[in-house]
Image (cartoon, helix red, strand yellow):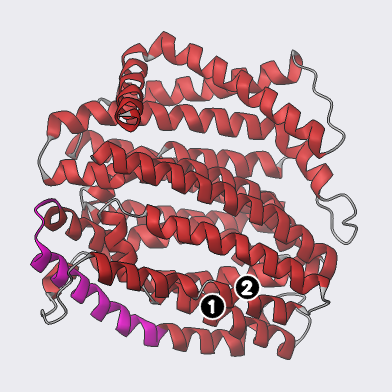
Amino acid sequence: MRSKFALYNMWFSLILVLTTLGASLILPRLLIREFGSSVYGLTTSISQFLGYLVLLQAGIGGVVRAALYKPLAANDIEKVSIVLKTSASFFRKLAFISILYIFILVWTLPFIIKGNPGFIFTATLVMIIGVGLFIRYYFGITYQMLLSADQKNYFSTILQIILIIINIMLVVVLIKLGAGIHLVMIGSTSIFIIRPIVVNFYVRKKYKIKTDCQPDKNLMVQRWDGIGHTVAYFIHSKTDIFLLTIFLGIKEVAVYSVYAMITSGLNSIITTIADAVTAAFGNMIAKDENNLIDKNFKSYECLIHSITIITFASAAVLVTPFIKIYTRGFNDANYLRDVFPFILLAAECVYCLRQPYHMIITTAGHYKQTRNGAFVEAALNIVLSITLIQFFGTIGVVTGTLVAMLYRTLDYFFYLRNNILFIKIRTTLKRLIISVMNMACIIIFMHYFVKISIHGYLSWIGSAILTTVIAAIMTYGINLLFYRKEMKDIYLIARRLVKKKTQ
């Protein structure tokens, strides 16, 4: 049953990733073509500043999910209700802080953003985008975490897919009708209010949640430890644009965002597959099935590394031709860069390679034990990025991110070795070295032995299919050479799932 729900979550989440990636390809081009790079960069900068709203969750999301695994496994509705009641009480307090944060940004952000079009224009955009993010983060988030912990996340995923498609159509229609950027943002924001309403209705109908229980404050003792992981993640994903906004201006933000939509799409594919089995591992941990955890983790690690290698090696070959096609006609900023996209890809690749280790640590609830590593990663990212941006611009920012990613990945290895899986560091380092060599072989082979000619979207798609197939074949061959047992286990799990589905 765990494998069945993990498969459901993975497939629907992958569809969501592809839908989101499609939206991220369509909407930025429409916005840049209609309103220019400056306005698009402005909306991106505002969204990134407001993205820090999620930090106000204080790392509570992972803590709540970890607290729900055991009562869900034991079908203890009383305990589940107490966890949800405690979570909801905590988020109500955070909601007031969030409103204050938005109000402060409305009055300060127009003076911080370099090259913004004016106070009223910027302040009203902050208000519109801020209200939308507030509603999405704080309404229905408790029930969303319940669905995630119970491996029922596919319900809200299907809902989000539908809303993203509706949002694309609405934005296209509004732009065709000549609407300004403010009206477009209002329309886009309004669509996503539907999701928390529907999720709340679904959970109340499906689960017999008790509302007359009392919150248990002891459940949230790890929330300050969880914030370290949350801070590190958001510094990883937001600091680059934050610094570019202040030091280089919103046109450079627009350039960065076009490349980042590619890397974030690839990141989403990997993390979606990784997250699909999180609840399953949480259930194993709750039942102390240690031998099963060890066996499944090796196969899981092999799968994530393989997909990451195929995805990012292909992206390294295809990113520059794609940007040339995508930005054709954009003349108000220089979108073609040489070194920057490859450092950005390397940073995201390292982040994805470490996902199996991050998943085990957070699923086991080891927030306090690993919070210092999270804080060091965040500090490294900020200090190096601020220092290097002075000399190397955008390249300096992403270099700081890459170094921070490498540090935290090594920190994860040593912690897992000593505390949870007791894996040999030699084994993990061997896997990393083989992964790097695998990617290098794919890129070198495609560069020197396969001649691809790209002139438009159709030829790029054909080249992308060819590159991915070659990367998959080479990765499969290397895995058979070094990880035959893990590949056999992955095959057996897949065959069992297909057999169950057929029956």
Q: Amino acid at mark 2?
A: Ser
Q: Are there few (<14), some (14-19), or many (20+) residues within 10 Å of tag 2?
A: many
**Residue 438 left/right relative to 100:** right
Query: Which residue is found at the position 80% from the left and 51% from the top?
Result: 335
Query: Which residue is found at the position 87% from the left and 34% from the top?
Result: 455
Residue 188's tag is 2
The answer to whether mark 2 and mark 1 are in CB contact below 8 A is: yes
Q: Main SS type for the magenta part?
A: helix
* Region in magenta: 73-97
Relative to 67, is 373 above or below?
Answer: above
Which of the marked residues, 2 or 1, is nearer the chain's N terminus?
1
Query: Which residue is found at the position 26% from the left and 29% from the top?
Result: 296
Tell whether position 308 is magenta. Answer: no
Tell whether position 84 is magenta. Answer: yes
Residue at mark 1: 132
Query: Which residue is found at the position 40% from the left and 28% from the top?
Result: 303
Residue 33 percent across, percent down from the top left: 84, 63
Distance of mark 2 from mark 1, alpha carbons? 9 Å
Q: Amino acid at mark 1?
A: Gly
**Residue 120 left/right relative to 363:** right
Q: Is residue 164 visible?
A: yes
- Image quadrant containing the N terminus: top left
Residue 94 percent across, percent down from the top left: 35, 81
Q: Nearer the viewer, residue 213 or 123?
A: 213
Q: Is residue 256 visible?
A: no
Which residue ends up furthest to the top in the rendered image?
Answer: 481
